[in-house]
């Protein structure tokens, strides 16, 4: 993309990745930055809000819900549109039972997290620890939060969804494999069908397939890849029966019409699924990963003809890439890293011990990657080819 100076000295952008609006806080090319949040996600803890905590400033009666910060830190992911980061539903087990959902609009100079809906039971009208985990719902008809892993996906023009609900609060012993769809206001508009035959509802990976208007999903353990058709809400399984990983990530690759599946159970940590033939292949992977556990605890993004991913316990400024050298089904893939400027001064914190999942992603409208490791900070990285 090209940038020219205006009379005022500000850049004028043109090209495929040119954002329609350029926030003042965007980092320089090949630099990391932090978003200047006017409202952090931490500030939206309902216990801190007098309108949602009848006992404020004392702890609320629903303190047994767990710790709000674990919406991010405990096996939970996010999804995104081309300029918004979205928390459709996350928590799970005894970590967080609130089904509050949130979004962050970054197409502004003053970004801040917004709560879309308060959690069920904040006023005592719903008992969340009611032993009804197997229904997937609270008594008010709203869904119970699970550990979301890589299940959150964004359906363009429609809104966020969970490809699979999974184990839910409070006990985590039950829950459903149901698909859940939300609108942009954070309201649930679809519940079901169940994804059966994809393994367990733990460590699930999901992705949206625009070619078929479908969501693909895979859980841990023995099973197949599943497909939820959004037009008629039917579910089928496809491909061979195999042993899946404890954690999975699925990424649809346009142009090639295949799905990349990162899994530690694969010999080269990568499998490629062809939705047309239902074939599952394991192409050769060349090169060395830097700073990243090779598993499905991150959700790769397909950007500029390569998978980009971050899940680093060391070398936290580096984004790993995985690029097919030909046919992604059969030809080798090459590992590399995106360059980081020598003068970069912002260094992200290390990965959460439970994984990054969809808390790393690509915002195409702004030409930046985002990374979220906790409820206080949002990191961004701006590659040189988007500036």
Image (cartoon, rainbow, N blue to C red):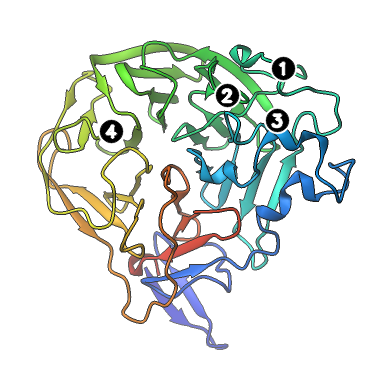
N-terminal-most mark, 4 or 2? 2
N-terminal-most mark, 4 or 3? 3
* Mark-to-mark CA distance, 1 and 2: 12 Å
* Mark-to-mark CA distance, 3 and 1: 22 Å
The quarter of the rendered structure image containing the N terminus is bottom left
* Mark-to-mark CA distance, 1 and 4: 37 Å
Q: Where is residue 309 in the image (x, y as percent from the top left)?
A: 33, 50
Question: Residue 261, labelled with which disc?
Answer: 4
N-terminal-most mark, 3 or 1? 1
Q: Is residue 132 above or below residue 345?
A: above
* Mark-to-mark CA distance, 4 and 3: 30 Å
- Tell me the residue that label 2 is attached to: 168
* Mark-to-mark CA distance, 3 and 2: 18 Å
N-terminal-most mark, 3 or 2? 2
N-terminal-most mark, 1 or 4? 1
**154 or 100: which is nearer to us?**
100
- Tell me the residue that label 3 is attached to: 187
Q: Is residue 179 left or right of residue 308?
A: right
Query: Could you tell me if residue 232 is visible in this image?
Result: no
- Tell me the residue that label 1 is attached to: 130
Quarter of the view holding residue 333: top left
Mark 2 element type:
loop
Q: Position of residue 240 (x, y in %)?
A: 22, 14
């Amino acid at each position: 993309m090209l940038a020219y100076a205006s009379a005022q000295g500000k850049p004028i952008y043109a090209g495929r990745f040119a954002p329609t609006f350029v926030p003042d806080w965007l980092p320089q090319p090949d630099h990391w930055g932090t978003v200047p949040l006017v409202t952090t996600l931490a500030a939206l803890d309902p216990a801190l809000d007098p309108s949602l905590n009848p006992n404020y400033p004392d702890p609320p009666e629903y303190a047994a819900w767990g710790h709000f910060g674990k919406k991010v830190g405990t096996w939970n992911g996010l999804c995104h549109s081309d300029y918004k980061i979205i928390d459709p539903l996350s928590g799970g087990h005894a970590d967080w039972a609130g089904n509050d959902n949130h979004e962050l609009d970054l197409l502004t100079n003053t970004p801040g997290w917004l709560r879309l809906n308060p959690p069920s039971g904040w006023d005592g009208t719903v008992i969340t620890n009611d032993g009804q985990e197997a229904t997937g719902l609270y008594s008010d008809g709203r869904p119970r939060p699970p550990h979301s892993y890589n299940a959150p996906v964004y359906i363009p023009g429609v809104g966020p969804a969970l490809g699979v609900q999974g184990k839910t609060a409070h006990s985590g012993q039950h829950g459903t494999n149901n698909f859940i769809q939300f609108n942009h206001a954070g309201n649930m508009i679809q519940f079901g069908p169940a994804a059966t035959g994809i393994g367990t509802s733990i460590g699930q990976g999901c992705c949206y397939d625009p070619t078929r208007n479908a969501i693909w999903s895979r859980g841990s353990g023995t099973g197949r890849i599943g497909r939820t058709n959004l037009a008629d809400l039917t579910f089928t399984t496809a491909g061979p029966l195999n042993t899946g990983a404890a954690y999975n990530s699925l990424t649809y690759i346009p142009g090639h019409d295949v799905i990349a599946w990162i899994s530690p159970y694969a010999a080269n940590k990568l499998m490629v699924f062809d939705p047309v033939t239902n074939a599952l292949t394991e192409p050769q992977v060349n090169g060395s990963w830097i700073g990243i556990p090779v598993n499905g605890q991150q959700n790769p993004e397909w950007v500029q003809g390569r998978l980009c991913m971050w899940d680093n316990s060391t070398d936290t400024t580096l984004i790993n890439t995985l690029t097919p050298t030909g046919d992604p089904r059969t030809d080798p893939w090459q590992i590399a890293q995106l360059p980081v400027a020598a003068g970069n001064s912002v260094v992200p914190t290390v990965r959460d011990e439970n994984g990054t999942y969809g808390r790393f992603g690509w915002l195409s409208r702004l030409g930046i990657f985002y990374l979220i490791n906790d409820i206080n900070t949002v990191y961004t990285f701006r590659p040189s080819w988007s500036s």
